[in-house]
Structures are given as C-alpha cells and as structure tokens.
Amino acid sequence: MVLRKGAGMKRKIWVAAAILGLFFSAPAWADVSWSTLRELSLDREPLDVAASADGESVFILLPGEVLVYSVQGSAVEKRIPVDKGFDRMTYAPRLHGLVLTGSGSKSLKILKLQDIHELDVSGLPFMGPENAPVTIAVFSDYQ
C-alpha cells in the first residue's frame, strides 16, 4: 500500500474551506411581497384559527362555536356549536377534521368534517317517487 502525503492534505483543506464558508459567507437578502386576500370582522375575539389543507376554508374558534369561513365565497358558511371550555384548535388533514382542546379542562374533541354538496336534479330523468326522502345521483361516462 502506497500512501501519498498530498492526497490527504487536499481533502482536509476542502473540508476546512467548506466549514469556514458556512460561517463567513456573505449575507443574502430576500424581500417578501404580500397583500391582503380577505378580511373578516368578528363580533367576538377569536380564541384560535386553523385552515384546511386545501386552503379553501378557515376555521375560527369562538367561545361556544366554530365558524367555517369560505375563502372563495368570502363568507361564514357554517357555525358548529362546541362546548365553551374549548380554547385551542388545530386542523388534522388526514382526518379531514378539527381537534379541539381546553386549557382549563382535561378534554379533547375531534370533529370529523364531511362536505355535503347540493345538486339540482329538477328536470332530470329519475326513477321512483318524486318526493323520496333520499336521492341518489349517478354520474357516468360512456367512454
């Protein structure tokens, strides 16, 4: 085995230069541009806020309820009643739900959210009674 003195020294110099470069590099400046997307006035102070994974909804925790704010529609779409003891909230993307906790109580509540879409089926062909309590809409593609 032949050991060359120069090869080991070059490697050590490169490592030292890389480490020194981390500490003595020139600062780089970046700027951030921002604008207000939506603004909402509330009648009470919010306790906590969370956003859905797709960014379409913002959940606002108030004492006794959760407001579901639609970013697209710029309006509060739903109000979900909750216990007044809950004062913290987070969105759980895998559950598609909200996790509520209370600092004063030893409780946790998980709300599973399900999207419900209204469909206007008037004038479309149907089977069964016109005033049935349940309507099943079938979407198909013949290709």
Image: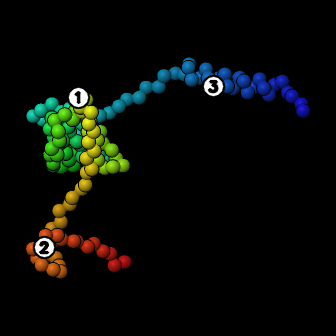
Measured from the top left, where is residue 17 in percent x and y?
65, 23
In the image, residue 101 sits, relative to residue 130, either above or below, namely: above
* Label 1 Cα crowd, 10 Å radius (few <14 / some 14-19 / many 20+): few
In the picture provided, is 80 more to the left or to the right than 96? Answer: left
> Element type at marker 1?
loop
Give how far across and how far down residue 104 sits, in percent: 23, 28
Query: How far is the residue under mark 3 from the one under mark 2?
Result: 74 Å
Q: Nearer the viewer, residue 88 or 77?
A: 88
Q: Is residue 74 visible?
A: no
Pointer 2: what residue? 132
- Write the residue at 32% across / 33% down: 33
**First along the sequence among labels 2 and 1:** 1
Q: Which secondary structure lies at badge 3? A: helix
Choose the circle earlier in sequence order: 3 or 2. Answer: 3
Residue under pointer 3:
18
Say left or right for 70 vs 28: left
Q: Where in the figure is residue 60, as x and y percent of width and height?
A: 20, 39
Q: Label 2 sits on what residue type?
A: Ala
Name the outermost residue toward the right.
1
Name the residue beneath numbered marker 1. 104
Q: Secondary structure at mark 2?
A: loop
Mark in the foreground, 3 or 2: 2
